[in-house]
Amino acid sequence: MSTFVHLIADYGPSDPAFSEVVHRLTAADPTISVQSTEIQPFSTVATGFWIAQLGVHNPAFDDLLIYSNTAPRTTESTPERADTGGALCYLELDNGVPVVAVDAGYNLSFIADCATTFREIELPADTGQFRSRDVFPRRVAEIASGNRSSLGAERSLDDVPAPPESVVCHVDGYGNVKTSIRASEFEPGSDTVAVELNGASREVVVRDAVSDVPEGSLAIVPGSAGGGDPYQELFLRGGSAASAFGTPEPGDSLSIRAE
């Protein structure tokens, strides 16, 4: 049984759409509590990044279920495939955490290597236009309560696209720019690099920790996300790295070259 649902959605807590989803979850099971994480509209990169950060790189506990409700319907959401809604799926991670998410874009890319179960969730034949409000919460509540009767066909993790290389995954409230570049894969070749992002090119120092960055310097450092092999992030001591690059968004590509 999972009574704590962490909802990752592309609308914020102040949006009435969020209120309706929480209302439907609570109506289906009054014992459920919901914690939200807001990501940019339609960003499957940010969604996948946060599913992994909360489901893999934070401690697991018995009552936890990760639920993602990011489901772009009409635009091509990865280079490999276009999604027109995507299937609602159930995954179980190797730490025991259950995940319910739409298989669209990069939503599942950051956890595919950690998943031991991947199955489609059966839905009514006609889910209607507002399935994320009218249908999904009921299925999530059932699964959270231990009812797995809606789990259908197994799906192949081989069909889930790999995480995108060298892109922005998240910009936090301090303006730190979290990327998809793992520390283990980062080979700058110099103590100073040129970073091109969002039409801007900036000289950036390479440091091993935030504490090594002097005041006023723009740096790339191992960040707070990604667990034991953290993702690199752009950090400006005393300012906003995001502002230095014109406020990039998740999915924006960056390139790095030695100076």
Image (cartoon, helix red, strand yellow):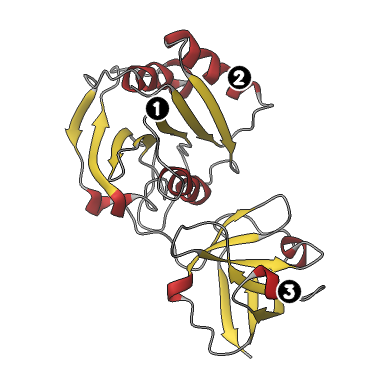
Q: Is residue 55 above or below residue 166?
A: above
Local SS, label 1: loop
Cα–Cα span, label 3 and label 1: 41 Å
Determine which of the numbered discs, if any, sits on residue 19 in the image.
Answer: 2
Q: Position of residue 3 (x, y in %)?
A: 42, 21
- Residues tagged 2 and 3 counted as in contact (Cβ below 8 A): no
Q: Residue placed at 67% from the left, 69% from the top?
A: 210
Q: Quadrant of residue 122?
A: top left
Q: Amino acid at mark 1?
A: Asp
Q: Residues within 10 Å of mark 3 (few under 14, many from 20)?
A: many
Cα–Cα span, label 2 and label 1: 22 Å
Q: Residue placed at 44% from the left, 50% from the top?
A: 57
**246 relative to 190 in the view: left or right:** right
Q: Residues within 10 Å of mark 1 (few under 14, many from 20)?
A: some
Please name the residue that numbered disc 3 is placed on.
218
**191 relative to 52 in the view: left or right:** right
Quick one: quadrant of the C terminus? bottom right
Determine which of the numbered discs, if any, sits on residue 63 in the image.
Answer: 1
Local SS, label 2: helix
| 2 vs 3, front mark | 3
Q: Position of residue 28 (x, y in %)?
A: 42, 10
The residue most toward the left is 153
Q: Earlier in the sequence, mark 2 or mark 1?
A: 2
Cα–Cα span, label 2 and label 3: 39 Å
Front position in the image: 198 or 24: 24
Q: Amino acid at mark 2?
A: Ser
Q: Amino acid at mark 3?
A: Leu
Is residue 255 in view from this perspective?
Answer: yes
Quick one: quadrant of the N terminus? top left
Q: Earlier in the sequence, mark 2 or mark 3?
A: 2
